[in-house]
Structure formats: C-alpha cells, structure tokens
Image (spheres, rainbow, N blue to C red):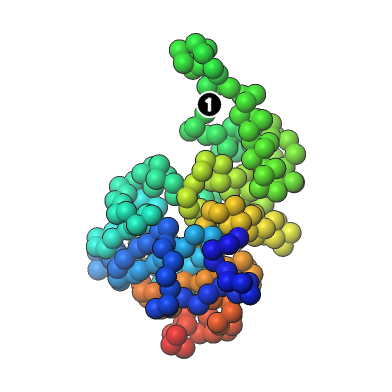
Amino acid sequence: MTTATDAAGQAPAPGPAETRTPILRARRLVKTFGRVVGLDGVSLELYPGEVLAIIGDNGAGKSTLIKCLTGAEIPDEGELFLDEKPVHFKRPQDARAAGIETVYQNLAVSPALDVAANLFLGREERKRGILGSVFRVVDQKGMREKARNELKALGISTLQDVTVPVENLSGGQRQAVAVARAAAFGSKVVVLDEPTAALGVRESNQVLELIRNLRDRGIPVILISHNMPHVFDVADRIHIQRLGKRAATITPESHTMTDAVAIMTGALRA
Ligand SMILES: Nc1ncnc2c1ncn2[C@@H]1O[C@H](COP(=O)(O)OP(=O)(O)OP(=O)(O)O)[C@@H](O)[C@H]1O
Ligand SMILES: [Mg+2]
C-alpha cells in the first residue's frame, strides 16, 4: 500500500490538511423514511488505498449510508461523486457497473453453484468463435482457470478446488469467494457489510487478511462492522455514525477503542 500512509507508516490524520482526492465522496446525504430520518446530512470520503470502517450504534444509519452509496437506496438530498464525477445510482446494478462492488452478508453467493461459477455469476464468459457468439456456450475451462488465478492472487489458499459447490464451504470460505468475486472484475471500490459477523476467530482472520490484500492491490474497502477489535486491526480510518449523522472520522492512531465507543454513544465529543 502506498497512498494512505506516510514514510513512518502512520495513516495521516484526516482534517483540513487533507489534500488527497477521494475515489468516492458523498456530500450531505439525506434519507428519510416517513418521519424517521435515516441520514441527516452525511458526508463521507473514501481515499485510494485505504480501508474505511463505518461504525455506529444500532439505527445510526450505517446500512442506509451504504445503501445510498451502492444504489440500493436513492438519497432524498445530497451528492455522490466517483473519481470526482457526479453519479446518480438508481439501482445496485448502476453502482456495480461503475465499479462499486458490494458484498452483502447473506446473498453474496449462490450455494448450489461451484466456486468458479459464483465468481463469474452474471458475467459468464463464452467460448471463442461461433460456439460462444451464436450458441452461447460458456467457457467453463477458461473461467475455472481464471478463478484459480484470482484466488491465488488474493492469497486465498484454503480454497484449493474451484469446482466444489459453495454450499459445501465454510462461512469464511464463502465470504472469501464473495470478496474474490468483488475483486476479480477490476472494481474501484469494495463494500463489505459485516463480513465477519457470523465467523469464528480463524475465519475472521482470513477475511481480515483478504481485506488487507484487496487494499494492497489498490482497491479501497468500506467495511461496516460492530467488532471493534477487527475495525481497529484493519481500518486506516474510522467513520463514526451517530443518530443519522457523521459524529467523527478518527484513526486507530488518534483514538482508542474506548474513545470510539464513547463517540458512538455521545459520551465523548470528537
Ligand atoms: N426501509 C426503511 N423504512 C423505515 N425506516 C427505516 C428503513 N431503513 C432504515 N430505517 C430507519 O433508519 C434508521 C437508520 O437505520 P439503519 O438500518 O441505517 O441503521 P444501522 O446503523 O445500519 O443499524 P444496525 O446496526 O442495527 O444495522 C433507523 O431508525 C431505521 O429504523
Ligand atoms: Mg445495519
């Protein structure tokens, strides 16, 4: 990783001195549900080469924020910029086509299909020539080969056989397939919603390692998590949501976990 750390390896503190250009920027997003205010003027910046965690209490607006960034919800007000260009996502496919891949916790993979088929789901490659162009025959061999290479490049070593149905994999391996899928198609941004929530210690560590690998390959990651140790382990910066607003953006260097929880609950003002 290069851009998010200085020579001493410390993530630079956010603030007025920030001169980098964000890959993804949200400005003053508002989203209401009837009388409930889900987002109350939230801004967010995601910089190249970083892992940005989003934390906050239940109902703080984390999921709503992610949904507005990934086309699953349309904000009532506010602006969204990808590479400094305004974007208006109407549905998740729009965000995906623009390079924002979201890994939802449960619907990320199709259980009955094998690993390679999951990686290429919705983007199947056809055989060359008339077989592919006219008869739409999928290039299974080619996709399996690419799937193996992709998993290898991401350092996913626990998944040897790409022909195994995903339903036979462990939770961590499934999550790995979902992340690999997001990484495999030249995504600009990967968004992970609670990727370690249902996983054991070993599997969680594998997913955290995968997140670092993604970042080190130049793909910035937005990670929603309730797990403070995981957040402080992997995040370069931490966006704290509270009551529909951004309460603060901190770093693991600038604040402790106790501080973060205090900001989340309103006990500490950042
Ligand atoms: N579709 C919806 N209809 C009505 N209210 C909603 C809807 N989606 C979210 N809300 C409300 O918006 C607020 C923010 O919800 P959101 O799901 O973004 O919180 P969250 O931070 O993801 O919480 P959690 O940690 O519990 O997942 C809450 O008050 C919630 O009840
Ligand atoms: Mg949520």
Q: Quadrant of residue 248?
A: bottom left
Residue at the image position 44 percent from the left and 66 percent from the top: 20
Ligand 1 shows up in the quarter that is: bottom left
Q: How many marks?
A: 1
Mark 1 C-beta to ligand 2 under 8 Å: no
Residue at the image position 51 percent from the left and 16 percent from the top: 132
Q: Residues within 10 Å of mark 1 (few under 14, many from 20)?
A: some
- Is 174 placed above or below 223 here? above
- Which residue matches tag 1? 125
Q: Quadrant of residue 81?
A: bottom left
Return the x and y of residue 106 as percentages of the image width and height: 54, 49
Residue at the image position 58 percent from the left and 36 percent from the top: 118
- Residue 159: tell me if it is visible: yes
Q: Quadrant of residue 143?
A: top right
Return the x and y of residue 21 as percentages of the image width and height: 41, 63
Q: Quadrant of the N terminus?
A: bottom right
- The residue at the far front in this view is 7
- Residue 170: tell me if it is visible: no
Name the foreground residue: 40 vs 35: 40
Return the x and y of residue 194 as percentages of the image width and height: 55, 60
Please name the amino acid that badge 1 sits on. Answer: Glu
Q: Quadrant of the C terminus?
A: bottom left
Residue at the image position 30 percent from the left and 68 percent from the top: 28
Return the x and y of residue 213 as percentages of the image width and height: 64, 54
What SS does tag 1 mark?
Answer: loop
